Every structure is written in C-alpha cells, then in structure tokens.
Amino acid sequence: MRNVLILLLSTLTLLAIGCRSHSQLTRSTDHETLYPVSMHGLWGYADEEGTVVIDYKYEQASFFVGGRAAAKSNGKYGFINRNGHFITKPIYDSIGYYTLTQANVIRRGKSLTIDNNGKKQESGILVSVGGNSRPAAHPTEYFELIDDKYVLDAPLVANEQRLDPLADYQVDDFTFDDVRQFSWKSMIVVSNNSSDLYLLNNGGLKGLNFDHIEPIRYHWNNQASTQYAKFYTDGRWGVMSSSGDILIEARYENIDSAYGQYYLVEYQPDCWGYVSQSKQYF
C-alpha cells in the first residue's frame, strides 16, 4: 500500500474573525491565508485583514489544504477552490482526513477514498498520528475497591509515609470516591467532588484541588490523551500535563479537543478559536 503522508499541524496562523462553531472548525496545515468566517449561520472566507473574499454561502467550512477546502452546501460536502467554486461536487455525507491528493469521505453510508477528481481509490489514506506511546495505568494496579471506595494499597501508603516521615499519613488520606485512568505516570483521583492527580513512582498526590480533570481527546481519532488533560476550576477551563504542570491557565469557557500542540477553546459563549501554550489565535 502506498503511504500517503498526512500533513499534521506543524504551524498554525489562525485568525479568528467573528464567532465560529467548534464543530465547523478544522485545522490549517499550510500557509494559505484564508480563514472561515460566519454570519447568520452561513460561512464564508476572509483574508488576514478581515476582508470577506468568499461570500457567506456555506453551511460548514474548513481550512484550505493544498488549494482546496471542504465545504457543505444543501446538506452535502464537497471541495471548493480559493475562488469559492466547487471543484469536487458536494455529494458526500461527510469528509474526513484529506491530504494534497486524497480524501476519506462517506457517501450513502459507505466509506471510501477519492482523489482530487473524485475518483475512487483502491487504497485508503494511511493515517499517521502521534499521541499515546504508552498505555495508561489502571486503577486496580494501585488501588483496592473497598465499600465503594478506592483505597491505595497498604505497601504504597507505607511508602508514602517513608518518603515524607513528618506527614503522618493515614489510610484515609489515600482513600477516594473515584480513580480514573490518565497516563502511565499518573491517575485522576476524586474525593468530595474535588479532583487531584496521584503521581506514580513515588510522586504522591499533586495537591491540585480542581473541580474536574479529564484527559484531552484528539480530534482526529477521539482517543484520550495520556499526556494532557483539561481541568476546571473557578468556572473556567485550562490545560495541564500528566505530571500536573499547568500549561494553559484556566481562562476559557470550554475546551473541546487537541490538534497536536493546539487546543480548540470557547473563549466567549459560542465563540471558538485555537490556543497553544504560548499564544492564542483569535
């Protein structure tokens, strides 16, 4: 099978103009400077100065990759060029991964791969996505379920006491209402509606005291990350690492998913854009 390289997000120069529904946003994988914009539920494209160059006429719109973008019209998807004309007719139920030369699509309930001319290909796109390199630790490896509570195994409690002799730890200090998988180096623990990280390999509790922690999901395969999580505190969401380090402060209404090192966030009600650890693109 011929390997087709998926152009993953390496650089993103997203200019957010107006409010954009997160379900209608996708990634930009090249340097073309046309950006989806919306008005009254319809989508068009603007340049970097905010001038609308393709009128508002699509039901959904994606970023351009290699001179084409997926767009929805009359309930179906196709590809448009930079002039806003359909170069692949809107006859598909959905469009998934697409590269410079191929696209994964669904038509009449069947998945297939097409080329730039809409011709069916014998071999599909080989999707290469970085992400989870090691499996997440399972709670039963470290905790025992007793009376609907997760209790850290006695040898591990003794080890915590050995590492911090002045703490005077008790078993109750490591008893939780819930323990959830996260990464190979940590697990999410919940007690009295407060979430924290239990760091494995002599790490102990991180002491975060957040309202909620859950692993970020990758947009392209919906798999939970074993490296990054979103957390909720004081009515806002942020991003943290599996070691409990805060990567993006809690300042957003919501966080949807990850695109490599970029995160799709709701920065105002019903307004979505992208952020990285160092910059926001709206």
Image: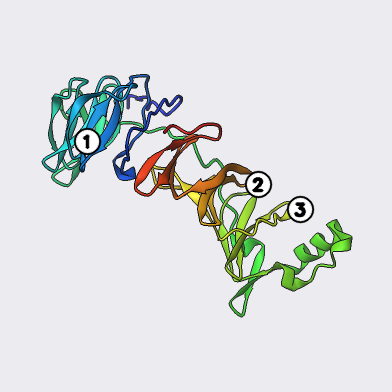
Q: Nearer the viewer, mark 1 or mark 2?
A: 1
Give the residue type that dot 3 points to.
Asn
Mark 1 or 2 closer to N-term?
1
Q: CA distance from mark 3 to mark 2?
A: 12 Å
Mark 3 or 2 closer to N-term?
3
Give the residue type that dot 1 points to.
Trp
Q: Secondary structure at mark 3?
A: loop
The disc at residue 228 is none
Query: How many C-alpha atoms fall within 10 Å of the one at disc 3: few (<14), some, or many (≥20)?
Result: few
Mark 1 or 3 closer to N-term?
1
Q: Secondary structure at mark 2?
A: loop
Res 122 seen here: no
Frontmost residue, 282 versus 255: 282
Q: Nearer the viewer, mark 3 or mark 2?
A: 2
> Residue drawn at (41%, 25%), measured in percent from left and top?
13
Q: CA distance from mark 1 to mark 3?
A: 52 Å
Mark 3 — residue? 202
Q: Are marks 3 and 2 in contact (CB under 8 Å)?
A: no
The disc at residue 243 is 2
Give the residue type that dot 2 points to.
Ser
Q: Is residue 246 left or right of residue 261?
A: right
> Residue drawn at (84%, 56%), measured in percent from left and top?
163
Q: Can you give x and y, in whole percent of width and height, for residue 116 in the image?
A: 20, 23
